[in-house]
Image: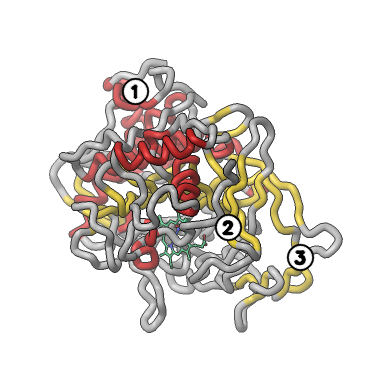
Amino acid sequence: MRITHRLLAAAIAAFTLAPAQAQVRAFPANLQYPNGACSLSPKELSHWFASGSIAKGGLVTFANSVAFPQQNTTCDFYKWAHQMFLWISSPAAGGIVLESPTFFDINFDNSGGHYIPNAAGVVRHSFAVRGTKPQSIQPGGQAGGGDTVLSMNGSLVYFGVHANDVYAWFNTAVSNKAIPATAPFPNTQAGLASVVSYASSQGTSLPDANALGLELKTAWVDAATVPNAADYVTIDATVPNYVKTSSTLWTINKQSPTVAKTLALVGIHIVGAVQGHPEMVWATFEHRNNAPDNSFYFNTLFGSTVQVPYNSTGTWSFMASGGSQSGALVPQMTIDPATGNVVATNGNSIRQNNVYRVNPWGNAPTAASAGNNSQLISLNLDIDVMLGLVGDVRGNYTQVGAVWTSDGSIPSGPTSPALRGSLLLANTTMETYHQVVIPNKSASMGCFGCHSSTTSTGTSHLFPINPLPTK
Ligand code: HEC
């Protein structure tokens, strides 16, 4: 179908007239007319598709990170992130691009992290149930002593970590001293050229070189537990197999410690450098059915700033319909790092968690955030409507926000004045309990609450991991 502006306007109007449907969608009915601060035209979106037209299941190409505009706007960063999401979740040869040879899963054992190549054909990932936020990478990957999340329908959340080939070959070149350890993540044509030439010396070409290096973290639930698996991007994986020993303890089944499942994507962090930005752009996406937003403000097409109240009515994966904020965000259970068992926290039982998005669009829920919120709302709405018209599942995912620095400086902390975008960004499936600053705890204020550093590569908790095999 060819999508014109007129069609787009008609679709937005129809969308507004369907409040019942809007209930569980990312856009409440009163959110239909953002001021268009960051709009994406049908023409622009068609150009993201390899075929040149918006089509259900069509391959979206990666954003050209080397050609990222130097005279840029906030909207340029959000569009970059969204194009990368649509690329990574594009169908490709029996799976999605995340499962193609361009990406690696990163698995952890006692000798650290390892790049696991995706073979062409059927891929079965091996994902752990991890603490939501271990404060350091634990050997074994499982662990972390962190809190974890159970969905309303009883699925644990499973986490994966991934990187693309540019990231992996940069890592390998640094580990093998072909690129100095002080080098930033490639963020210029010259920086990229040394990675491409090193990979080429090892007989590898990098078809996605201009995507630059990308590192991802993904969150999944058992696809058998969501109301309609067709509304989700899915993959096949093996995950830990638990026996529900008691209401406070689930143990790993000794006879068959893992089980094969189809998993449904609920959250994804997409992090990568663009030209002049070695600190990387830190973006996050969520399925629209995850959890309700706290109240927030945005600017309308008609020039007013309106407040959207908290409304938890709907079918959510991580919030009971009509659930209250009080009593939410309390970790009910943790993963025991020694055994991988699920253990209830003191006085609690292993049960569903009520979760909400404390800082919608990654900003404090005050009127001062209306401008940033409007940018994200207008971009998401345009993409949602255009992909919705062709019935593409990727339209069910919302960009919550992204954060970077104005001048490419490396943020030494979460309040660095150069930070731009969504300063309190979090994903309800991955930073569930770290959305707010917990006094006296090493907690978070957005991505750079934990990923701040003095060097480009220091922002990654992974880098460097064990290099790829070389000749
Ligand atoms: C409370 C601390 C904390 C916050 C807040 C946090 N992270 Fe992380 N993140 C970690 C830790 C620890 C790891 C490594 C272990 C793991 O994967 O769980 C990690 C891993 C990652 C990875 C895998 C690659 C890497 O750098 O190690 C990505 C990508 C990532 N985080 C993105 C984000 C984004 C985007 C945000 C903000 C929306 C964010 N993180 C917020 C602690 C945090």
Q: Residues within 10 Å of mark 2 (few under 14, many from 20)?
A: many
**Residue located beneath label 3 in the image:** 252
Query: Helix or strand or loop: what does disc 2 sit on?
Result: strand
- The numbered mark, 3 or 2, whose residue comes first in the sequence reads 2
**Residue located beneath label 2 in the image:** 113
Closer to the observer: label 3 or label 2?
A: 2
Q: Residues within 10 Å of mark 1 (few under 14, many from 20)?
A: some
* In the displayed structure image, the side of residue 251 where residue 358 appears, left or right: left
**Taking the image as four quarters, which one is ligand 1 found in?**
bottom left
Instruction: Using the image, tell me which numbered label, if any, was put on residue 58.
Output: none
Which amino acid type is shown beneath numbered disc 1?
Answer: His
Residue 236 or residue 363, whichever sits in front: 236
Mark 2–mark 1 Cα distance, whole angstroms, equals 37 Å
Quarter in which the C terminus is drawn: top right
Q: Residue at x 34, y 52 (%)?
A: 184
**Residue located beneath label 1 in the image:** 47
Residue 69 or residue 28, whichever sits in front: 69
* In the displayed structure image, the side of residue 347 where residue 361 appears, left or right: left
Q: Residue at x 42, y 58 (%)?
A: 460
> x and y percent of residue 256 in the render?
82, 57
Q: Residue at x 69, y 34 (%)?
A: 122
- The numbered mark, 2 or 1, whose residue comes first in the sequence reads 1
Instruction: Tell me: residue 364, above or below residue 303.
Output: below
